[in-house]
Image: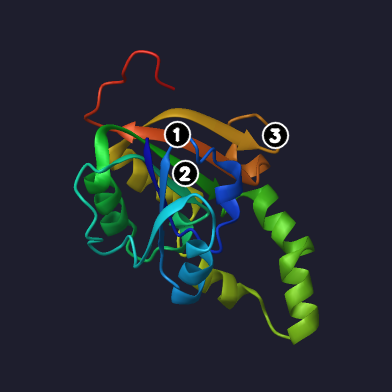
Amino acid sequence: MTTLEIGAGTGAHVAFEDLTRQDYHCLELRPEFCSRLRSLPGVVSVTAGSIEEPTGFTSAGFDRVIAIHVLEHLRNLPAALQEVDRVLKPAGIFDVVLPCEGGLAYSLARKISAQRYFERRFGMSYTPIIRNEHVSTFAEIRVELDQRFTVTSERFFPIPVPFVPLNLCVALRLRKRDAAPSAGSA
C-alpha cells in the first residue's frame, strides 16, 4: 500500500502506522518540519508543499491519503480536496480527523484550556488567533467533503454518539464518490 499524509507536521502520527506494510510519504508545508520528517525511519519520501496547489504526485498514485487535524486550516479547501481526489486511486481511502469546531463541547474545552492559558499569559483575546488558524467549521468541511467523497465509517470522540456538539473530534473514512466499495473493504 502507498500512503500520503498531508500536513504531516513533525511526524507525530507516523508512530501509529505499521510502516512494514506500506510505503509512507509525507507532504508538509513548513521546510523545518520536512527536515524532521526525513529523519524518521520508514518514511519513504517527504515533499515540501501544499495540498491546496498541484503537488506533482502521480495521478491515482496513492492507495490512502491521511489528513489529521489539517482540513480546518486550509483556506482553499475545494482545491485541496480536488488534489486529494486526483492523487487517490479510484478505490483509495481518505482518512480524516476533524475537530468539532463550532460545537459546544469543543468550544468549552478550548475556553478552559488553550484560550484561558493564552489570554492569561499574553493579556489579549484568543479569538482572532483561532479564527485565523481554524478557517472552517466541522459543518463547512463536511459540505465540501460530501461533494467528492462518501463516508464509509465515522467515529466520534469522546462520546461515541454521532452528535457533533457533544464531541471534540470525529474520524472519518471516505472513498471517492464514483468508487464502488470493494469486497472486504472498510
Query: Can residue 20 be seen by looking at this rendering?
Result: yes
Residue linked to disc 3: 159
Up-down relation of residue 185 to residue 94 (above or below): above
Q: How far from the left and from the top, in percent, is residue 185?
A: 40, 20
Disc 2 residue type (three-letter): Val
Which residue: 34% across, 68% down? 49
Label 3 element class: loop
Which residue: 50% across, 73% down? 132
Which residue: 33% across, 60% down? 51
Mark 2 or mark 3: whose residue is earlier in sequence: 2
Closer mark to the observer between disc 2 and disc 3: 2
Mark 2 surroundings: few (<14), some (14-19) or many (≥20) residues within 10 A: some
Disc 3 residue type (three-letter): Ile
Tell me whether the residue at label 1 lies in contact with that at label 3, contact meaning CB atoms closer than 8 angstroms.
Answer: no
Q: How far from the left and from the top, in percent, is residue 146?
A: 34, 39
In the rendered structure, the answer to whether residue 182 lies left or right of residue 117 reads: left
In the rendered structure, the answer to whether residue 112 lies left or right of residue 96 reads: right
Tell me whether the residue at label 1 lies in contact with that at label 2, contact meaning CB atoms closer than 8 angstroms.
Answer: yes
Say which quarter of the image contains residue 46. bottom left
In the rendered structure, the answer to whether residue 112 lies left or right of residue 136 reads: right
Quarter of the image where the C terminus is located: top left
Up-down relation of residue 132 to residue 38 (above or below): below
Which residue: 74% across, 85% down? 122
Q: Which mark is residue 173?
A: 1
